[in-house]
Image (cartoon, coloured by chain):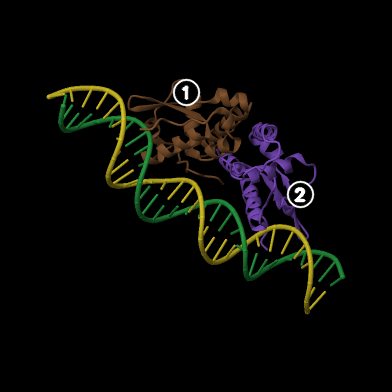
Chain colours: A brown, B purple, C yellow, D green
Amino acid sequence: MRPLQHPAIEDVSVEGILYALSDSNRAHIFAALAGGSQPCTCSQFLAISNQVLPKSTLSQHFKVLRESGLIRSERHGVELHNSTRCEEINQRFPGLLPSITAALLAQKKRAAAKRPRAVTSARARG
Amino acid sequence: MRPLQHPAIEDVSVEGILYALSDSNRAHIFAALAGGSQPCTCSQFLAISNQVLPKSTLSQHFKVLRESGLIRSERHGVELHNSTRCEEINQRFPGLLPSITAALLAQKKRAAAKRPRAVTSARARG
DNA sequence: ATATTAGTTCATGAGTATTGAACTAATGGA
DNA sequence: TCCATTAGTTCAATACTCATGAACTAATAT
């Protein structure tokens, strides 16, 4: 299995970051990684907000996050340990990730307040 | 010609905003609208950073920006006057747009410093 | 009326996303 | 050592989305 590729921090683009986080599932994964203190495996996200994702799909999402520079993945035995690259990115683009994370959280809270028990659709760009 | 559709501010999603701005051309257009003091027409952007865009493509880009809630377009005679909805959005998602705009600007400056005279490619997500 | 200008819609080819199935690689037993 | 299990990747097929030339609409001017 070929080694995992991570872009150098100077090759990380704003557009790439925005694109990676423009998908609800990826945004969810990233928020969870950013919020937690420990690196997470991919399969911890096989279920996201009431929907089950095929693992091939999940693998692609992690690949997009990794190639955008948002996360770092390290192989430990059979699993991957994923963590964010927030510090590096925050140095390069100060305030960008915190404000996106805050906005996603605000949106989530508001949605939760509006519809007590419902399903969040993926790729809802409207 | 059917009237232009703008989402209500409470229907604007973070994902939609991030997606709209994940394209270099749209990000460029939005930054210009945000930076300038006057509403701009679409055709002012027929040329963007050394490349010429077909007007059908440009029309689609404005549609995406409009439907994401980032801009408002008003018909004045035969042309559209486009302006941002930054104030509304900043109230709903404080700090989000300023930090994205700042990051795009920082990236642009850095790129300009690195390559004295070159062409910026569209949809560069790497 | 006709021409011009600004922007939209449509059709199509190119590109990208999703996902089941097959695969690889690491590890843990018999 | 060999087989099973587990975690994740790759492949292939289908479905979807994007970019763009051509045809169109609507407003204005001549």
Q: Chain of mark 2?
A: B
Q: Element under label 1?
A: loop
Closest to the observer, A36 or A60: A60
Residue A57, quarter of the rendered image: top left
Residue at (61%, 23%) from the top-left corner? A91
Residue depicted at 73% across the width and 42% down the height: B32
Q: Hey, which quadrant is residue A53 in on the image?
A: top left
- Callout 2: SS: loop
Badge 1 crowding class, 10 Å Cα cut-off, few under 14, some 14 to 19, many 20 or more, is few
Q: Residue at x 68, y 63 (%)?
A: B1
Residue picked out by circle 1: A36
- Read off the chain for label 1: A
Name the residue rendered at 47%, 41% in the picture.
Answer: A120
Task: Pick the residue in front: A75 or B101.
Answer: A75
Q: Position of residue A47 (x, y in %)?
A: 39, 36
Marks 1/2: CA–CA distance = 44 Å
* Residue B79 rendering spot, x and y as whole percentages: 76, 57
